[in-house]
Each structure stands twice: as structure tokens, then as C-alpha cells.
Amino acid sequence: MKKSIRIDGMNCGHCTASVEKALRAVPGVTGVSVDLASKTASVETDGASDAALKQQMFNTFNMGIGFVLAIAPEDVRQTLEYLDNAGFPAWEIGSVAAGGAARGIVRFV
């Protein structure tokens, strides 16, 4: 079964390749073609239901969070300003502490 999915936020060939790679990792997906110009992905599936495929994609794509950066806490403010000025809205969504070294987590779209 073939489906067309709108994918906002792609701006370059690297984005296209990343989205295509991520879609290929979704269980039930048997083929993918991503088009940057139309911001769509043509996805072939093994017949999985739309609900099952949507849940698998939700899980694969960071539970809807999108792209994240792990950066040093002292760099969060400057990074947020830089991304905002570049036209990429961003938010600090938490922190990670492993081995005693905290890292700020920034989401941007």
C-alpha cells in the first residue's frame, strides 16, 4: 500500500536523506521516496493499518519532539538566540545528566 505524507521543516538534501533513513527504520515500511521540493514522502507499507503505522512513526520520530541538541548548560542561551535569529524557533526542553556531566537539551523546528 502506498501513502503520501507531508513533511514540514525540510530545507536541504541532508534533511531529505535523514527523513528517508528514519522512515526506512519504521516497522511496516517497505519503500520510501522523499521529495524536498514538495516536502512530501511517498511511503510503501506492508499493509499495516494507518493507526499502527502512525504509532510506529510517532515512536521512531522522537515521540513528536523532533530534532534535539545536547549542549553544555552554559551554551544554551547563546544557542537559542542563534537558532532563533537564523529562523529556527527553539526551546529548552530539559537536561540530561550522565556520569556527573549535565547537558542542556534544546528542541528546534
Image (spheres, grey):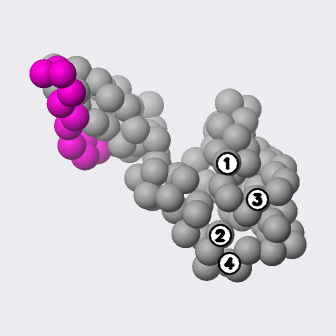
Say what amino acid the circle numbered 4 marks.
Asp
The tag earlier along the polypeptide, 4 or 1, is 1
> Viewed as shown, does residue 3 lie left or right of 7?
right
Tag on residue 25? 1
Q: Which residue is mark 3?
A: 29
- CA gap between label 3 and label 1 equals 8 Å
The reply to whether the C-beta atoms of the residues labelled 3 and 2 are less than 8 Å apart is: yes
Secondary structure of the residue carrying tag 4 is: helix
Say what amino acid the circle numbered 1 marks.
Ala
Q: Which residues are magenta?
A: 90-101
The reply to whether the C-beta atoms of the residues labelled 3 and 1 are less than 8 Å apart is: yes
For image coordinates 22% across by 34% down, the residue present is 96
Tag on residue 50? 4
Q: Which residue is mark 2?
A: 53
The tag earlier along the polypeptide, 3 or 2, is 3
Q: Nearer the viewer, mark 4 or mark 1?
A: 1
For image coordinates 46% across by 51% down, the residue present is 62
For image coordinates 66% across by 55% down, the residue present is 26
Circle 4 Cα neighbour tier, 10 Å, few/some/many (<14 / 14–19 / ≥20): few
The reply to whether the C-beta atoms of the residues labelled 4 and 2 are less than 8 Å apart is: yes
- CA gap between label 1 and label 2 equals 12 Å
